[in-house]
Image (cartoon, rainbow, N blue to C red):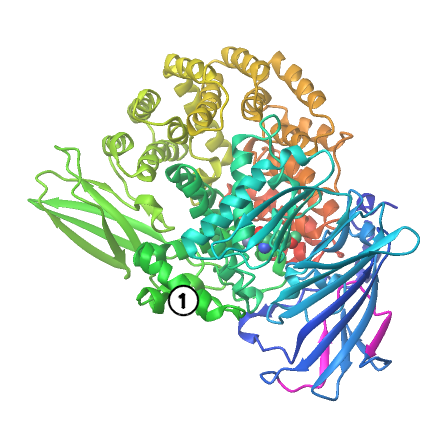
Amino acid sequence: MDIASRPAEPVENTQIADAAPPPQAPPVIHREDYLPPAWLIPQVLLDFRLGVDATHVVSTLSVTRNPEGNGTSTLRLNGDQIAPLAVRVDGREVNDWRLDGPDLLVELTGEAHSVEVETAVNPAANSQLMGLYASNGMLCTQCEAEGFRRITFFPDRPDVLSTYSVKMRGDKAQFPVLLANGNCTATGEGEDGTHWAEWHDPWPKPSYLFALVAGDLVANHDTFTTMGGRKVDLNIWVRPGDEDRTQHAMDSLINSMKWDEEAFGREYDLDLFNIVAVSDFNMGAMENKGLNVFNTRYVLADPETATDADYDAVEGVIGHEYFHNWSGNRVTCRDWFQLSLKEGFTVLRDQMFSADMGSAAVKRIEDVRVLRIAQFPEDSGPLAHPIRPDSYQEISNFYTATVYNKGAEVIRMMRTMAGPERFRAGTDLYFARHDGEAATCEDFVKAIEDGAGLDLTQFRLWYSQAGTPQLTVELDHDGARTTLTLTQAVPATPGQPEKQPVPIPLRIALYDRDTGAHSGEQLVVLDKDTGSFTFDGFAKPPVLSINRGFSAPVAIDFARANEDLVFLAAHDDDPFARYEAMQGLVVQYLVAGVSGRLDDAARTEGRAAIGAAFAAVIDDPELDDLMRGELMILPAETYLAEQLLVADPGAIHAEREALKAWLGSECGEGLKALHDRAAAVPYGRDAAARGARKIKTQALTLIAAGDPAEGARRALAQYRAADTMTDRQGALMVLASLDAPERAEALADFHQRYTGNALVIDKWFSLQGSAFHPEVLEHIKALAGHGDFTMTNPNRVRALYMAAASNPVAFHDEGGEGYRMIGELIRKLDPVNPQTAARFVPVLGRWRRIEPVRAALMRAELERIAAVPTLSRDVREQVTKSLG
Ligand code: 0A1
Ligand code: ZN
């Protein structure tokens, strides 16, 4: 039976249920329990006989006793769903090995040995996509975090660094291209149509950075000469037919290599850099040494099939993986609790790179939006954890927005406090000090402290405490003196009831109401529960611009007059603060609305202020369109829910939609003019043309909210005239939410036009899953039965169901249908791909912050999942914590 169609629920028989052992809680691993490895593996030889259904692996480890280890004679080699076919020590077969659960234990008497282990795996049956698996007839690996142990037995922990030599043999017709880490050192022909290749990676690395790829692939090839004069061959490998869609990825790679030299002094260290695109992948991409493996989504791009946002994502992920070569590979992590050491820092580096490649202002706004939508809810829910967690059951569950995005914000704060030059001195010291090592977050902080000359004693709390600090702001004006009083509270989170104040660096400016100007930005650091800062020289109360550039990842509670927000939205010279003022205006209004605090007069006043600010944004000739587009984006419903202790998602949706409709008609003429102007801008990849495309769809969304018939008419025209995916997808997105005849026509055309192009068909699923259409749940059910839907491809599963789970109309359906749908998905997907299944649990885990009727339904769904006795460790951990 196909694994995906196994019955998901236990048989309803109380006798069976009673007899079944209770589900076992997976063991908890604690950061404090770290012990150095007992044995080191300076060298690894791997010999692969490749086959899609059966791959045979011989691994030869040179094993030496670690002088810093505990002296045990037992060598523990981790395994996961593999069995040893043979074990040899110093060339002689031994039989006294034992299995301890999934691990292989071998007794060693001396100080250094050669240990050889044979295993066999079935890549075609590997639906988890961890270890060695088959994707579209090719073979590839994913080893981070603990996938290497699904290929061969090994001390699969990041502090065991080895040099790898790999030999692989396989059918030449099936696998014409054979790739591994490092450089190719020899190739040859074998018998029966086979061929082989040997690869050697001179840089010691942990097992999670191992990679192998074999398949029928073609490359876009280029070269890059490093600052030290090394000529590097660059290849982007894709399936034949996709090569014309790789140029943007190649340009992004070359830009990344150059940028890392200039911004961080980091030079590439091999003669070859390979990227391979695979269509079945659990995450975005993987930084394996010299052989990055990418989800096709972050490689393939052309104007016909990729939106401008997709182009940006390709650039950002290519940069991210490339930057890992130093922040992650040359300096790696001692243990998985240190994940943010490489991820937080590398996200910061990719954010800085993208900012330098395009509009820094827009990039900052986008990054903060992601943080608020994805990380803030995580930090205030049952799965909250510090950027350096203290414990885990399944490490895959800790590749989170907290570790990645809050991790980046924490390092960004150090940069803000040090200034760019001193921060660079700190990172230079970090790389010099720890090159070739498996380091800790503490090592990083110490290097920044020493190199940048900062005292980060108290700042370390950002690594150990979870929860988004809440900052209350008061501004008093008395005579000529202005006093700013700041109060912080770090909320309690699971396992951390008491918190200490953290240093919060805030870039601020005070605007003089009469002149409309400020006399310079300042950095204030609040490092106590409460602090006051005084300013002289203002005849009238100044207008405060605070947390400029989002200098600290905090939530701010500052009740202020609409008039001040309108002023900042129009005048602030910090683009982020301008966006923030616009958001603040809308958030204040919508939150008051859903809380029943808006009487008619306040509603009229609130709308008038928002309408005036919007009209100014639409008309402001000084604004570029990319920035105009940002200012026109209304706060997300999840972010609005985050402002409330207990949220009613239905009320939030209704209030936000009502504002959209009001804005659409109030600013209708301006929006139509904007849409017409943008539609006349010819195609280009420059900022002006991209900006025009961005506002085109923003305007269309609001026009459709105000006047659905006019919206549908314009959307269909935009769809038909589209010469880019940006315009086509934007138009289809608007149509997908409308109950209009144009909808079906455009959706059918889109599917037919892009049949066979998986990434675009993903968009087709996703657009319908995220539509605010009254029948969206029926649509999603029908799509789940569509011939193009499959549970085995994570991109397709996410396209439909992440869209559904993030769509308030579908997910928060009053009857609980959306919760049941996601619960059922988790139960069905878990046996196929637990890592991807576990990603859907946190949305249900938000139940405590949702009104009681829905909360009960969400909780019931979590309980239904928890009752499955065979749950994976991944889903079990998330569900248990979400219920607890
Ligand atoms: N290190 C990668 C993320 C990654 C983690 C786990 C994976 O397993 C499926 C894959 C990729 C990054 O930060 O890009
Ligand atoms: Zn990363």
The magenta segment is 70-88
Q: Is residue 544 left or right of residue 289?
A: left
Q: Nearer the viewer, residue 162 or 810?
A: 162
Q: Residue at x 69, y 66 (%)?
A: 164
Q: Is residue 117 left or right of residue 751?
A: right
Q: Give the vertical position of 736 relative to 411 (above or below).
A: above
Percent coordinates x, y for residue 670 in the rendering: 37, 15
Q: Which residue is mark 1?
A: 429
Q: What amino acid type is highlighted by mark number 1?
A: Leu
Task: Confirm if mark 1 falls within 8 A of ligand 2.
Answer: no
**Residue 469 placement (x, y as % from top left):** 37, 54
Residue drawn at 63 percent across, 72 percent down? 160
Q: Is residue 634 left or right of residue 509?
A: right
Q: Position of residue 881 (x, y in %)?
A: 58, 57
Check disc 1: other Cα within 10 Å, few if <14, some if 14-19, many if 20+.
many
Residue drawn at the location 32% of the way across and 57% of the way down: 421
Relative image position of residue 140 (x, y in whole percent): 73, 51
Quadrant housing residue 480: top left
Give the structural element (helix, strand or loop) at label 1.
helix
